[in-house]
Amino acid sequence: MDELALQPILSNLAEAHGELARLFARIQLVVFGEVKDETVKGWAETVMQDERTSPLDERTLFVSLARAYRHLNVAWNGRHASKERVRRGDPVDFNGWSRFPEEAAFRDLWPAPSRCRGTPREPGRGHIMPNSLQAAFLQMAVRKLGNLRYIISFSLGDKKVPRPKGLRPGIETEPFTEAEFVWRMHRIYSEMNFAWAYRKGGEDLSRQAIRRRRQFPGVFLAANASSAVLSRASKPEDRP
């Protein structure tokens, strides 16, 4: 347990969870006309206002996912940092931790090198087609991230995070290991990648399509695109 910097991991997971929950609630609103999922109903009023002032488009989706990716990356890459190093908050550390994980365990999520080179295409105010398939992938990402937050918070003795429904009995008595951490992070990344890949609809769920669409999107990888966009983007306010 001492090998993992659980407190900074948990704080970054909480930020990523907030980003994805808000985005999931907004996708639900657009697709179904209401925020149906009980776990994100607290976002209903906020996302209704978001949609009235600025309808969801590709760039908005990109920025929300980029923020969530960045926090997940920091949680993973900074998992062994000392408390002093985290407290110091060196920008060099943060920039390094913000990059996507390159360990072998995530190798199947990386696209061919040719898709990660060159100047990234910056998403504009292009048309997207939020759909039930995309909503389902975001729902799974939110739930899996919620499970991970609970497990780590329980390990820290923090009772603020409620126990998610459906979490297997007795998990609180099992030690939280790095192997479990990477497995759960891999699943969260996969669902987020699908949520981006299916932003314009499409029902191709063939094995080849699934393998391709579960990879990190090149637009987030090329030249560390997320940092470039995030430096100019305002942060969402009024979290519930």
Image (tube, rainbow, N blue to C red):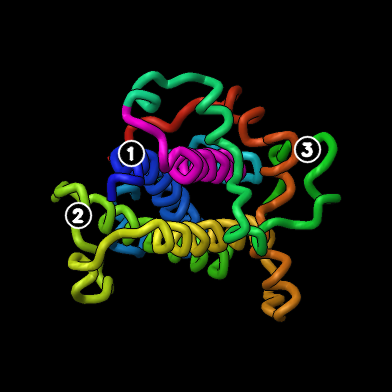
Q: Which residue is mark 3?
A: 120
Locate residue 125: give its quadrant: top right
Q: Left or right: where does residue 160 sit relative to residue 49?
A: left
Q: Nearer the viewer, mark 3 or mark 2?
A: 2
Q: Is residue 39 magenta?
A: no
Q: Amino acid at mark 1?
A: Ser
Give the vertical position of 158 relative to 213 (above or below): above
Q: In the image shown, does 163 or 110 lie closer to the viewer?
A: 110
Q: Which residue is mark 2?
A: 154
Q: Amino acid at mark 2?
A: Phe
Confirm or deny contact between disc 2 and disc 1 (CB under 8 A).
Answer: no
Q: Left or right: where does residue 30 sit relative to residue 232?
A: left
Res. 11 mark: 1
Which region is colored magenta? 60-83
At mark 2, the secondary structure is helix
Q: Left or right: where does residue 57 sit relative to residue 76?
A: right
Q: Amino acid at mark 3?
A: Pro
First-in-chain label (1 vs 3): 1
